[in-house]
Amino acid sequence: MGFWPWSKTKQVKAAVKSPLYVRGRYDAAQTTPDNRKHWAAADGLSPNAANQPNVRRVLRNRARYEVANNSYARGIVLTLANDTIGTGPCLHMLTDDNAVNTLIEDAFEQWAEAINLADKLRTMRMARAESGECFILLVANPQVDSPVKLDLRLIEADQIATPSLAAVGSKVQLDNITDGIVYDKHGNPIQYHVLQKHPGDRGGTGGDIKSDPVPAAAVIHYYRADRPGQSRGIPDITPSLPLFAQLRRYTLAVIASAESVANVSILMKTNAPAGGEAAEVEPMTEMEFVPNMAIFTPEGWEPSQIKAEQPATTYEMFKREILNEIARCLNMPFNVAAGNSSGYNYASGRLDHQVYYKSIRVEQEQIGRVVLNHILRAWLAEAVLISGFLPSELKDTPFCELDHQWFWDGVEHVDPNKEANAQATRLASNTTTLAYEYARQGRDWEDELRQRAKEVALMNELGLTAAQIAPSSAKPKTETNDAQNTSKRAA
C-alpha cells in the first residue's frame, strides 16, 4: 500500500534531546475491588474480532425478538424509518440543460415508483436498526413496469457469509475476507458471497450452504461503522436491548402483582389466639360471595381486603426514565419514542426535535451518498443503453459530472404561523434563500415557482385576486381556543 506523499522526500533528522518521562494516571484506568466486576468484560479486540459472526448473530436474534414482541421497540424502529425515509427521496438534477434534467427526473421517478423504492428504503432502514446492516443486490427484473428493468433485492445480513475455503478458491487469501466480503490489497470490497439460502430457512442450517460470488459493483452495503476498520454492522438498538428486557419484565411483574391482589376479594382474619373462642375454620378455605346477599362470618372472624401496592407511584417515572435511556442511543427524544408529549412545553419540545432531526439529516446524507448515488449510477448505465430513452450524449458523460441532489420530506412545524413569520423575516433580511427554504420542506424551489407562476397567470385570466381566493382569517372563538389547546398539547 502506498502512503502519502507519493514522491520521495528527503528525511531531515532533527536534533533529539534526552526524552522527558512523565508519570501520569487516570482513575478510570485503575482496577480496584469496587470496579473489578464492572470492567471484567472490557477487552482490546479489533472491531471485526469484537463483531465476529456468532456475536452478531446473537445480537440480531435478540434485537429482532424485541422488535417483534415489544410494542415500544416496534414503534421506535418504525418511527425512525418513517422519519428518515418519509415518502421517499426525490431526485433533482443540476446540469446546465433544464430539458435533460426534467427528462431524467421524470424517468427516474417513474422507475422508482415501479419498483417501490420508498418501501424498500424504509425496510432497509428498519433492518439496520434491528440487524445492524442491510445488503442490496442490483438485479435485472423483466417484470418491472418501466423501460429500465433494474430492480433492488434486499438481502438480510445472515445471508452474506464466508463459505468454506474450498468454495472460495486458492486465489483469495483468508486475510482479505471478512465474513462474506472479499477485499483487495487496498481495502476495497471486490466481491460478496451471497448464500443461496437463508440460514434460518427450513433445511438451511444443515451442512455448508452453497454461495454465489457477486461483484461489488452489484452490491450496496448499508451500515454504520462505529470504529475504524469495522466491516460489518451491529444493530442500532444494541445498547438498549437489556433495557427493553428490563422494561418488559418490570411491566409484567407489576401486572402480576396487581392481579394477585385483585383476585382475592375478601380476606378473613381473626385476632383470637390458637385454641381461643373463634370458630373452627379450615385454613385457606375459599368462599364464594353472592351479589346483594347478607353474609354472616364465622364467630371471631372479620373480613378485610388486601391493600393494593401495585402499580406504585414510581411506576410511570420508571418507565419514562428507562424509555428515555433506550431512545438515547438513537438520538430520539422521549416524546417521539413514547408517542407522548404531555409533559413537554413548546420550547423543550422544539429543542429536543432539533437534535433529533439533525441526526435524521445525517442519516439521509449517508443514504444519499452510499445507497441512492449507487442506484442512480446503475440506473443511468442501463437507461442510456435504451434507444431514444435518454439523450445520447449522456453515454459519454462521467457520473461525477452529473450534478444532482436528493430532496427528502420536510419537517412539519408545530406552529405554522410562527414559522411562516420567521421565514418571511429571513427572506426579507437576505439571511436565507428560496432554494434553502423550499429544500427544508422537501420541495424544489424552481418547480414551486413555475407552479406558482401558472397559478398567478390563471388567476389573472379569470379575473381573480389574491384577496378573493384567500381563506377567511376570522375564526369562531371556540375554534380559536381549540386550536390553541391543540398547539399546546402538540408542543
Image (tube, rainbow, N blue to C red):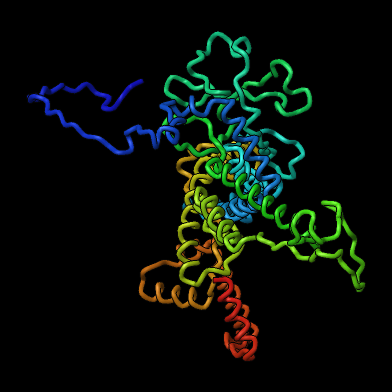
Asked if residue 191 shows in the view, the reply is no
Q: Quadrant of residue 137?
A: top right
Q: Position of residue 99 (x, y in %)?
A: 55, 55
Q: For the view shown, which residue lies furthest in the front direction?
A: 276
Q: Number of labelled discs?
A: 0
Q: Position of residue 479 (x, y in %)?
A: 64, 86
| Residue in the image at 86% along x and 66% along y | 297
Asked if residue 12 shows in the view, the reply is yes
Q: Nearer the viewer, residue 482 or 410?
A: 482
Q: Assign the C terminus to one quadrant of the image.
A: bottom right
| Residue in the image at 46% along x and 61% along y | 354
Q: Is residue 242 above or below residue 95?
A: above
Q: Position of residue 43 (x, y in %)?
A: 43, 28
Q: Nearer the viewer, residue 26 or 195?
A: 26
Q: Quadrant of residue 469?
A: bottom right
Q: Assign the N terminus to one quadrant of the image.
A: top left
Q: Nearer the viewer, residue 327 or 302?
A: 302
Q: Nearer the viewer, residue 361 or 9?
A: 361
Q: Is residue 318 above or below residue 415?
A: above
Q: Is residue 25 above or below residue 338?
A: above
Q: Position of residue 276 (x, y in %)?
A: 79, 58
Q: Is residue 365 left or right of residue 279?
A: left
